[in-house]
Amino acid sequence: MKFAIDLPNFGPYADPHLTAEIAHEAEDSGWDAVWLWDHVWRDEGVPYGDPWILLAAMALATKRVRIGPMVTPLPRRRPWTVAREAVTLDHLSGGRFTLGIGLGAPAKEFTAFAEEDDAKIRAAKLDEGLEIIARCWSGERFSFSGEYYRLEDVQFLPRPLQPRIPIWAAATWPVRAPFRRAARLDGTWPLRRNPDGTSAPLTPDDVRGIRELVGELRTSAEPFDILVAGVTPSDDPVHAAEITREFADAGATWWTERINSARGDFDRQRERVRKGPPGA
């Protein structure tokens, strides 16, 4: 199992200098990746930083950790722009970029800007967007005509530095449809939804179910990543390692440590980064 932290792109983390510094500290502390949220407006009176510029600052401040947005709401963005930004970050980071994609939430980040908030339409735009990104990354000249997007005789260069930039899709367990999409990609960041619509933490049994479902749906023999996000204590490394080991045994390949205000004030958040991965 590999270990990451994820940072919001708002509050103190809107400062690109500070976020780059924390990414550097994460690398020095033994983490394997630093992910970044992608929101444009969620809470009143809170500063926000552009996630792609923050990621560029993180890329320049690090040499080893993977970086990427977890996750970017692709239906809110022009897919060809995301394709270009992703390749640029891939080159800037020396091939350390991972693209996380999803439908996006909360809905007000769409409605406040008169953008599409119907989940089915956003899902269709997401699927078209993924096809466009793949064809942009091919470096070949192409045209595309879909229900929501149209491109005419375009070619995107340079190609990614990596043979393939990994794409991980957010998905909601136990709903099957999002995992059909994820199974065509390189990994998934699943969340759990209860029957009443509320969210809940994933369990190791959930991960086993996801691994089994993806195995049924997937046609590629390439490795597939399952990410689990959660919170482990910084003052009890043995217990922290026990928590993550259960998920690793169930088939998760990444543990992502939540670094945000739910953990406490900013100093406590930063201290958890400096303590390093569970069991380190």
Image (cartoon, grey):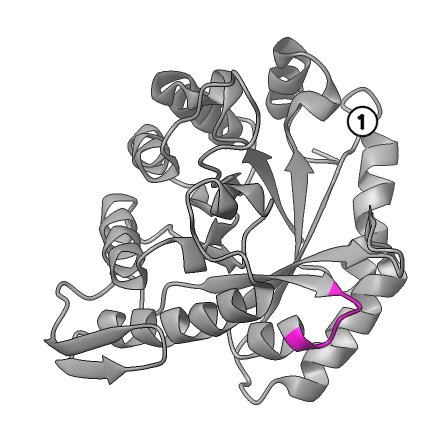
Q: Is residue 32 located in the magenta-colored stretch of the structure?
A: no
Left or right of residue 62, residue 85 in this image:
left
Comparing 210 with 179, the one in front is: 179
| SS type, badge 1 | loop
Left or right of residue 101, residue 254 in this image:
right
In the image, residue 28 lies at what x, y percent? 49, 27
Q: Which residue is the site of mark 1?
A: 233
> Residue at the location (44% across, 64% down)?
166
Asked if residue 171 shows in the view, the reply is yes
Query: What is the span of residues highlighted in magenta in the rendered image?
Result: 173-177
Vertical placement of residue 125 versus 36, above or below: below
In the image, residue 223 lies at what x, y percent? 56, 73
Mark 1 residue type: Pro
> Residue at the location (75% across, 79% down)?
213
Looking at the magenta stretch, what is its main secondary structure?
Answer: loop
Comparing 274 with 121, the one in front is: 121
